[in-house]
Image (cartoon, rainbow, N blue to C red):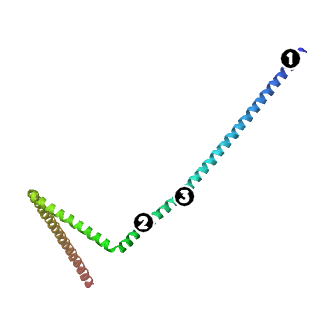
């Protein structure tokens, strides 16, 4: 009897332990499922936020492009208005515009005269440099003429050679044609 009681007590104890372990395992599974559900929820939330940011970025790009286009149009309009204002102002102030044109022409003429005077003075101050430069210019002119003459001579020679070849080919063709017609006439 004692054995059966011990056996039953052990079986009950084992069942209680197994039930406790099963409850712990079930509780652990529930926690894992909750964690997995939370992980999925976090991932869904993250992707939705990322999609919102992407769409927002796209909208900002379109808005920025539209604003840039508007800005360019405003700048072009301002430039056109400024040009029109200057033209109208110039037309209204013809006397002032004429005086400014004369002033500008006078300044340009003065600058040209000063530059020519400086070049004349430089030539007087450095005659060796001037004569060396003029000699180099003469040499370059002569060299250009020589190159031009030699190129013209080469072209003439090529043309003469080509003409002679063409003449020979034509003479051969005429000879062949004459021989062919004589041969036809003999038949």
Q: CA distance from mark 1 to mark 3?
A: 84 Å
Other-residue count near label 2 (Cα within 10 Å), few / some / many at <14 / 14–19 / ≥20:
few
Q: Name the foreground residue: 171 vs 11.
A: 11
Residue 163 lies, with reference to residue 120, above or below; the image says below
Other-residue count near label 1 (Cα within 10 Å), few / some / many at <14 / 14–19 / ≥20:
few
Q: Quadrant of residue 168?
A: bottom left
Foreground mark, 2 or 1, reads 2
Q: Quadrant of residue 128?
A: bottom left
Which residue position holds label 1? 6
Among numbered discs 3 and 2, the one appearing first in the sequence: 3
Which residue position holds label 2? 79
Other-residue count near label 3 (Cα within 10 Å), few / some / many at <14 / 14–19 / ≥20:
few
* Rendered-image quadrant of the N terminus: top right
Q: CA distance from mark 3 to mark 2?
A: 24 Å
- Disc sitting over residue 139 in the figure: none
Q: CA distance from mark 2 to mark 1?
A: 107 Å
Which residue position holds label 3? 63
Q: Is residue 6 left or right of residue 92?
A: right
């Amino acid at each position: 009897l004692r054995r059966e009681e011990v056996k039953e007590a052990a079986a009950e104890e084992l069942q209680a332990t197994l039930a406790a372990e099963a409850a712990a395992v079930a509780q652990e599974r529930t926690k894992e499922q909750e964690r997995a559900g939370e992980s999925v929820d976090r991932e869904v939330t993250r992707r939705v936020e990322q999609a919102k940011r992407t769409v927002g970025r796209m909208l900002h790009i379109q808005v920025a492009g539209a604003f840039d286009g508007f800005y360019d149009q405003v700048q072009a309009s301002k430039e056109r208005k400024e040009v029109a204002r200057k033209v109208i102002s110039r037309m209204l102030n013809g006397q002032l515009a004429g005086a400014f044109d004369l002033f500008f022409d006078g300044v340009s003429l003065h600058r040209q005269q000063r530059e020519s005077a400086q070049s004349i003075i430089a030539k007087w101050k450095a005659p060796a440099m001037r004569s060396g430069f003029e000699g180099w210019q003469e040499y370059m002119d002569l060299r250009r003429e020589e190159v031009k003459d030699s190129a013209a001579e080469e072209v003439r020679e090529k043309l003469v050679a080509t003409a002679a070849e063409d003449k020979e080919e034509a003479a051969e063709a005429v000879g062949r044609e004459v021989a062919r017609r004589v041969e036809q006439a003999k038949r």
